[in-house]
Each structure stands twice: as structure tokens, then as C-alpha cells.
Amino acid sequence: MDPERSERSRWIVHGERVVDENRHIRLSVADVELPNGVRFEQYVIRLPRCAMTLVLDEPGERILLIWRHRFILDRWDWEIPGGYVDAGEDGAVAAAREVEEETGWRPRNVKFLLTYQPAVGSADAPQDLYVARGADLVGEPEPDEAELVRWVPIEEAQAMITRGEIVGAATVIGVLHAVAERAASSRRTR
């Protein structure tokens, strides 16, 4: 990377004022200036870290998904389970807790895969993606978490993305990871 080039396109932040803040969000307005001198205000959203979990069945052929309504989009979609990491909580512990709360399944051997930012142009919203292989049914999902819980074949989940039945970034990334992992595994066994 050329350091001069990276600094040439850097925005200048002259200040930031908080509009609203609670434990789930911090909304502020930043006074920013582009490299060409244009100055304007930009809304900034800061969200706490979340832990999302791709739960694969023991043979690695199906993904655990939940069907839920998202009022912001006013639509139903299929998602991998996940939620906020509490202050001081280990991410893998939070990931396992969220899976159990949202699905009634307790995941085995939860492992960190990656961290991503779903909307870097306007939000600081770190999402940690974990992978679990195998799960044990230990109860029912909490009533406000999921309408349905289903083990979905990886190929079907990939088709659900194309059909717009899966729209959340964590789930799209998780499904595509499962597809790539499965393809790599089949190449190794040839």
C-alpha cells in the first residue's frame, strides 16, 4: 500500500455530537470534510459487538436457521442465530448462549471464524462470526426469538440467498462459508 495515496483520500473529522445513546446504539452526527474541501454532516451509528453462529449438523450437510420477522424491513427471513455480546462476556460464550436462546439447540465446539462490519459507510457494528459443529436439542426457543427453527441443507440455503429468503449479512457470509468449506472438503477427498 502506498502511504501517500491512503492519506490523500482520508476524511477529516472536525467533531461529533451524540444525538441519542442507550445500551443498544449510539447515534451521532459527525462534522466531516472530504479531501476536496467539501464539508458536511454525516450520521454515524455505533452498535455493540454481536456474535453470530453458523451451526452445522454433525456431518456438515445442514445449517441451523431461524425464521423471524424483522420489523425494520417489515419482512420475514431466515437467519443464523446471534445477538449482542454482554460487557465482559467471552464472544464464544455469547455465541453459544444466543444459539440456545433462539433455537433450543446447544451448539458443540464453538470456534471463532471472522469479524466483519456490515455497513462501514455509516455504522461501526462489529459482528463476530462463529462456527459450531453439531448441537444437542435442550429445549424450546424463547417465544420472542423465532417463529420456526429448521435444519436446512447447505445447497438449499444457498438457493434461499438467490431467492431473497436470506438477506442478513451474517447469514449470507455463513452460508457462503459453508458452501466453500464443503467444496474444499470434496476436492480433498477426490
Image (cartoon, rainbow, N blue to C red):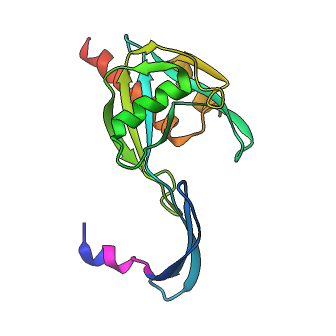
Taking the magenta stretch, the answer to whether it contains residue 30 is no
Residue 108 lies, with reference to residue 29, above or below; the image says: above
Residue drawn where x is 70% and y is 47% of the image: 72
In terms of depth relative to the viewer, which is nearer, 40 or 36? 40
Q: Position of residue 103 (x, y in %)?
A: 54, 23
Q: Position of residue 131 (x, y in %)?
A: 37, 29
Residue 45 picture location, percent across and down: 54, 63
Picture layout, residue 175 above or below residue 86 = above
Q: Quadrant of the C terminus?
A: top left
Q: Residue at x 43, y 44 (%)?
A: 85
Quadrant in the picture for residue 178: top left
Asked whether 10 falls inside the magenta stretch, the response is yes
Toward the viewer: 40 or 190? 40
Q: Residue at x 36, y 34 (%)?
A: 93
Magenta span = 6-12
- Do we see residue 176 in this rendering? no
Residue at the image position 72 percent from the left and 43 percent from the top: 71
Q: How many marks?
A: 0
Image position, residue 27 (x, y; %)? 57, 66
Residue 142 occupies quadrant: top right
